[in-house]
Image (cartoon, grey):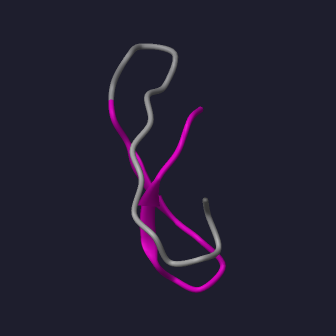
Amino acid sequence: MAGNGCEWMGMDANGCEWMRMDANGCEWMGMA
């Protein structure tokens, strides 16, 4: 969902939530 400015949630390999920013500078969560 990155790129549309919608915030979403994911987990990395350790099961920890993390945040990053899409190309629009919007804060979002993804999967590592």
Picture residue at 52% right of the left edge, 83% below the top: 25
Rendering coords of residue 21 (x, y %): 51, 68
Rendering coords of residue 27 (x, y %): 41, 70
Image height of 14 relative to 7, above or below = above
Picture residue at 33% right of the left edge, 34% below the top: 17
- Count of picture labels: 0
Is 17 positioned to the left or the right of 24 in the image?
left
Picture residue at 39% right of the left edge, 44% below the top: 9
Q: In the rendered view of the protein, which quadrant contains the N terminus? A: bottom right
Is 30 positioned to the left or the right of 27 in the image?
right
Outermost residue on the top side: it is 14
Magenta residue span: 17-32
Magenta region's main secondary structure?
loop
Picture residue at 48% right of the left edge, 25% below the top: 12
Rendering coords of residue 5 (x, y %): 50, 78
Outermost residue on the left side: it is 16
Image height of 30 relative to 11, above or below = below
Q: Is residue 11 magenta?
A: no
Image height of 13 relative to 18, above or below = above
Image height of 18 relative to 13, above or below = below
Quadrant position of residue 22: bottom right
Q: Is residue 19 magenta?
A: yes
1 or 27: nearer the viewer: 1
Q: In the rendered view of the protein, which quadrant contains the C terminus? A: top right
Is 32 positioned to the left or the right of 10 in the image?
right
